[in-house]
């Protein structure tokens, strides 16, 4: 079975819902537990065999570039000061993956961010993983591999991950109209941020996609939609309207999506990861219990 070797990771957004935390640092670099969010995303991708990652970046995002670079000076300092045990914390720098960066020079939406990857991706299938969303506690998910398997086995034009959300939250997400039930389903339509009344289900797009390169042609023809942005959901809709095959895949039980786009979700994610921390989790739980008394 072939694998998906290229991933596009959009990180160009301004993260305005997390101001002031994101005034001079990218939201994708905010820590959840011990690591920045985007490190979990890259670890998830490299675990399933991705070899090239293209970040779609913008001004103020250079700390992401630095984070994934080898920092020889830091390594040397740790050695010289007898802190060899901390070198393990930098092991992610040595993952067998090549990083590429391009700027989305106008913030015209997620669809436009993905379109910036066209000349890099060429005619290869590729994954898209949003840089502000972790799948599964500690990113222990093989969703990318499962999506790639379905993509090739079914000859799909796109495979999209979904998570069920409460009905009163559907207006925050792209929502699927599935053709059939089950955890892997064909999609009849996708609607960006519908009202609860318009929403055909509560299956919300969960930050992971696999695409055939034909998505670029659809993106080029996609007009600005909700919020005046070029929406990736609208391009998927165009692929569907033109007879394309789009498959949905539900996250498994326990494989939640942690989207840190607003403080409510960010606080929850941080606390959950901190509680699950091997070293600090137990003491943190006790501390929280004292606060709750
Ligand atoms: P969001 O819409 O949640 O991010 O996009 P945002 O625009 O940064 O958020 P707010 O509304 O201002 O708080 C989800 C992901 O897509 C990227 C973001 O960086 C984020 O990782 N994105 C979004 C882009 O790369 N370019 C865009 O034009 C929009």
Image: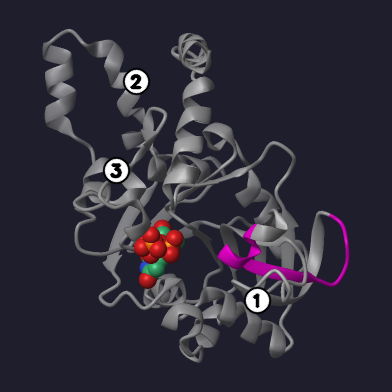
- Determine whether the residue tagged by mark 3 lies in a helix, strand or loop: loop
Q: Is residue 4 left or right of residue 36?
A: right
Q: Residues within 10 Å of mark 1 (few under 14, many from 20)?
A: many
Q: Earlier in the sequence, mark 1 or mark 3?
A: 3
Q: Residue at x 73, y 43 (%)?
A: 252
Q: Which residue is mark 2?
A: 88
Side of 120 where 244 appears, left or right: right
Q: Which residue is mark 3?
A: 68
Q: Residue at x 67, y 59 (%)?
A: 168
In the rendered view, tell whether residue 28 sits above or below residue 85.
below
Indicate yes or no whether the magenta region holds residue 178.
yes
| Mark 3 Cα-neighbour bin, 10 Å: few <14, some 14–19, many ≥20 | some
Left or right of 254? Residue 179 is: right
Q: Secondary structure at mark 1?
A: strand
Badges 3 and 2: C-beta atoms under 8 Å apart? no
Find the magenta span and give its range: 169-182
Residue nearest the observer in this picture, 207 or 174: 174
């Amino acid at each position: 079975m072939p694998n998906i070797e290229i991933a596009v990771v959009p990180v160009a957004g301004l993260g305005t819902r997390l101001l002031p935390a994101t005034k001079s640092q990218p939201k994708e670099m905010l820590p959840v537990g011990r690591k920045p969010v985007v490190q979990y995303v890259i670890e998830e991708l490299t675990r399933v065999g991705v070899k090239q990652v293209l970040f779609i970046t913008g001004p103020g995002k250079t700390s992401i570039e630095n984070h994934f670079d080898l920092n020889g000076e830091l390594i040397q300092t740790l050695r010289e000061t007898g802190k060899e045990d901390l070198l393990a914390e930098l092991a992610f720098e040595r993952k067998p993956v090549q990083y590429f960066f391009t700027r989305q020079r106008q913030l015209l939406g997620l669809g436009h961010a993905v379109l910036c990857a066209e000349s890099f991706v060429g005619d290869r299938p590729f994954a898209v993983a949003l840089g502000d969303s972790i799948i599964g506690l500690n990113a222990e998910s093989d969703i990318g591999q499962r999506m790639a398997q379905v993509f090739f086995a079914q000859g799909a034009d796109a495979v999209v991950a979904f998570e069920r959300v409460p009905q009163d939250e559907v207006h925050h997400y792209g929502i699927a109209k599935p053709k059939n039930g089950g955890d892997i389903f064909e999609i009849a339509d996708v609607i960006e941020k519908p009202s609860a009344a318009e929403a055909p289900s509560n299956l919300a797009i969960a930050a992971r996609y696999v695409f055939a390169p034909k998505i670029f042609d659809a993106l080029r023809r996609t007009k600005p939609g909700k919020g005046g942005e070029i929406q990736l959901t609208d391009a998927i809709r165009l692929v569907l309207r033109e007879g394309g095959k789009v498959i949905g895949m539900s996250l498994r039980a326990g494989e939640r999506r942690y989207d840190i786009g607003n403080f409510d979700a960010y606080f929850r994610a941080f606390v959950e990861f901190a509680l699950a921390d091997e070293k600090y989790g137990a003491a943190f739980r006790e501390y929280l219990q004292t606060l709750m008394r």
